[in-house]
Amino acid sequence: MPTPSSARNRKPASTARQILRLAIPAFGALIAEPLFLLADSAIVGHLGVPELAGLGLASTLLQTAVGLMVFLAYSTTATVARYIGAGRMKDALAVGRDGLWLAVILGVVLATAGWILAPPVARLMGADGAVLDFAVEYLRFSMPGLVAMLLVLAATGILRGQQDTRTPLVVATVGFGANIVLNFALVYGLNMSVAGAALGTSIAQWGMAAVYLRIVVRAAREHQVSLAPDWPGIRAVSRVGSWLMLRTLSLRIAFLATVFVATSQGAVSLAAHQLVMTMFTFLAFALDALAIAAQALIGKELGAGIPEAAAGQDGRNPAQRTVHTLTRTMIIWGLGFGAVAGAIVAALAPFLGQLFSPDPQVQAAFAAGMLVLAVGQPIAGYVFVLDGVLIGAGDARYLALAGVVNLLIYLPMLWWVYSASLTGGVGIAWLWAAFGIGYLAARALTLGWRVRDDRWMVVGASRD
């Protein structure tokens, strides 16, 4: 018969296995989108500096549009997980269906607006000349794939909520491979330049969306869930995502403001910033694998109804103790993974630039930004983990309001960098000191303040 001591010794291992079972496959799936951008950057970067700068500006705008819709994945993951924990599979699939329909509606609206508004928006961001032309070209040829990108977000959230991160890994891996082949063929084989990179990514995204739709439709039919749009359900998904959209909006404003300052520093700085931001996105999604595990596991615990149980001697009920253990473990892992990632980035910083651009000035500025990026990685690991924890708990309102506070703290730092009129490696280094260290530190403080006690668990437990 196991002793209490041996039971306690097994619990962390069990927690670790739960996290790793979801986080390792999620890691591969999460980095698919930044890998798409890395492939585009590497392919387009050898066409010239204006092409790469145009891609950098356009991809930031595109990521802003898609990023604002990330609630399609995050809110769906948490809600589906809570329904799964409560044993309500039909309700879980119905929420997923509503999310998919909302993705189609939003995708069509955004794609139409993006095609029409691409030139004035690119000009508003400070682009002109050849950089403007290439930015508009990339944006417009990306619009056919925008609906698919949102469908992929919503469908991925359904599977994550069902504790399935392996299927998204397979789909993302195949999609990334197809994206590289298509981009090479269109950019160099058909001489489509920047447009080829955008169109290749759009085709790959539609292939991924088709696979997800087949999986979800099959599950809905198996559980006799109607595929027809349910307008009250779609409106409910929209309401649930409104706070997460505000949270994401504050993040995207921070990203856009950073790009604006990089644009003011000249084409070399903008090109280097695009490369550093792409690496930041790659590392962010890698660290966010732990956050995905948090969303699924914590959402399921809070949905199982255990939070209504009586509290123990420590003041926590069984669900709160489990969630506390999961949170503490993932914070430690986030800090550790961030430190390891930072060390690797620092070691590779002097050499990576040659992979993306033959221009020595771009390479030097990129290396400077990468060194600063490396310093901020432990903070990033902490931030992304807690972000996922609170999303899984359904604490979207606090995340939204904290996001506004963080933005207000960051903008004065960014204004100082802009006013200093810095260029080249020095400019990029200070820009990334403001964003990669200052802004992340503000997020770390507001998130850390929230999890100092257990009130955020009660917020999550009251949902659904």
Image (spheres, rainbow, N blue to C red):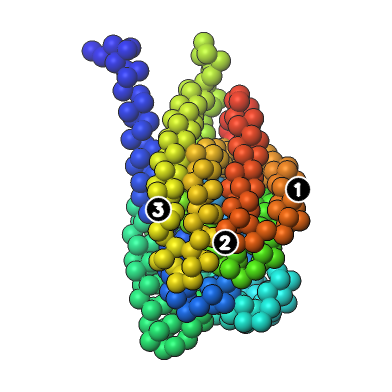
- Seen at 51% across and 10% down, the residue is 313
Name the foreground residue: 190 vs 451. Answer: 190
Q: Is residue 41 visible?
A: no
- Seen at 55% across and 25% down, the residue is 308
Name the foreground residue: 299 vs 42. Answer: 42
Instruction: Indicate whether 203 appears above or below 409.
Output: below
Q: Residue 203: percent from the left, percent from the top? A: 44, 76
Is residue 138 found left or right of 24 in the rendered image?
Answer: right
- Seen at 65% across and 75% down, the residue is 114
Instruction: Indicate whether 63 appears above or below 413.
Output: below
Per the model, the C-alpha gap separating discs 3 and 1 is: 31 Å
Per the model, the C-alpha gap separating discs 2 and 3 is: 17 Å
- Seen at 51% across and 43% down, the residue is 375
Q: Amino acid at mark 2?
A: His
**Outermost residue toward the bottom?**
190
Which disc is residue 412 wearing? Answer: 1
Is residue 224 found left or right of 8 in the rendered image?
Answer: right
Instruction: Indicate whether 406 appears above or below 354.
Output: above
Residue placed under numbered mark 3 in the picture: 348
Q: Amino acid at mark 1?
A: Pro
Q: Quadrant of the C terminus?
A: top right
Residue placed under numbered mark 2 in the picture: 273
Q: Circle 2 — which element?
A: helix
Q: Are marks 2 and 1 in contact (CB under 8 Å)?
A: no
Q: Residue 108: percent from the left, percent from the top? A: 61, 73
Q: Quadrant of the N terminus?
A: top left
Q: Circle 3 — which element?
A: helix
Q: Amino acid at mark 3?
A: Leu
Q: Nearer the viewer, mark 3 or mark 1?
A: 3
How many C-alpha atoms fall within 10 Å of the one at disc 2: few (<14), some, or many (≥20)? many
Q: Earlier in the sequence, mark 3 or mark 1?
A: 3
How many C-alpha atoms fall within 10 Å of the one at disc 1: few (<14), some, or many (≥20)? few
